Structure formats: C-alpha cells, structure tokens
Amino acid sequence: MGKKEILQQWINKGNDDLRSAEYLSTMHHPTPDETICFLCQQSSEKYLKGFLFQHDIEPPKTHNLIELLEMCEKINGNFNVLLPQLDILRVYAVLPRYPNELNITDEDMKIAIGYAKIVQDFILKVIEEK
C-alpha cells in the first residue's frame, strides 16, 4: 500500500470517529457523553498522526495530543492555533474509558464536537495544501 493510501486511512479513521461522535450526540439519553468526548479526542489524534505520517514521521504510540501538536508545530508553526482545542480534548483520552469523576455534561460534549471539527478542518486544509 502506498503513502497516499495510508494517509487516507488515517483521515478516514479520524472522520469515522468524529462522525460516530456526532451521530451518538443525536441519540436520546442515556448516550454516554464520556464516549462522545472520547471519540472527539480520538478523531483529533488520528488527524494529527496523519499529518505526521504525511511528513514522513512515524506517529508515536501516544494519546497525548499536546505531544503530537508539538511535533506538528515543528513542521508547520501554524499548528499552535489548535492548542486551546487540543488542551481540552486531551483530557478525554483515557479517563472516559474507566470509572471516574469527570462529570462530563451535555455542554462539554457539544464543545468537544465543535473542537474536534476545528481540528479536522484545520488539518484537512493543511494536508491538502501539500
């Protein structure tokens, strides 16, 4: 499989996670807001890793969005605009998968979806420019 096809797989996985989060957000409760926020984090992680892959960097096995952002910033300094969104989304990497005291609200879920869309839009635009 070629580089272009593998990059498309990263993008497709990110799109699938975000689409799933959006779909679940339309369901009647008790849809777990934690799961939706987790999917938003996962979509952003995959877009970041796809960008790194596009630039011949093997994406590290990490869920740390800030670490991934810093790697992307070394390639394109404009990535720093995503720091506010990724700083919020990073919290949803691990904790929502286990019993916790996050107390995620419907408003948190809506914000997470909006932030994931910002990340998606920015990275897809940057990927297309190369």
Image: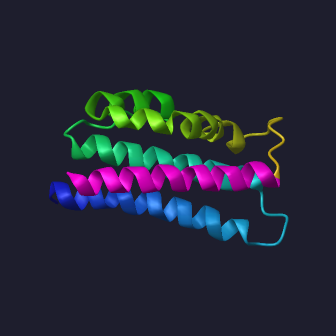
Q: Measured along the vertical axis of the image, is residue 49 above or below residue 22?
A: above
Q: Which percent across, then down, holds residue 95?
A: 69, 36
Q: Which percent across, then down, holds residue 100?
A: 80, 36
Q: Quadrant of the N terminus?
A: bottom left
Residue at point 42% right, 49% down?
46
Q: Nearer the viewer, residue 74 or 77?
A: 77
* Residue with the most extreme left position: 2
Apparent side of residue 6 relative to residue 20 in the rendered image (left or right): left
Instruction: Please identify the quarter of the rendering in which residue 93 is found.
Output: top right
Apparent side of residue 22 relative to residue 124 in the rendered image (left or right): right
Numbered label tally: 0
Q: Main secondary structure of the magenta part?
A: helix
Residue 107 colored in magenta in the image: yes
Q: Which span is picked out in magenta?
A: 106-130
Instruction: Please identify the quarter of the rendering in which residue 88 is found.
Output: top right
Residue at point 43% right, 59% down?
13
Q: Measured along the vertical axis of the image, is residue 22 above or below residue 32?
A: below
Q: Name the colour scheme.
A: rainbow
Q: Nearer the viewer, residue 83 or 68?
A: 83
Residue at point 23% right, 54% down?
129
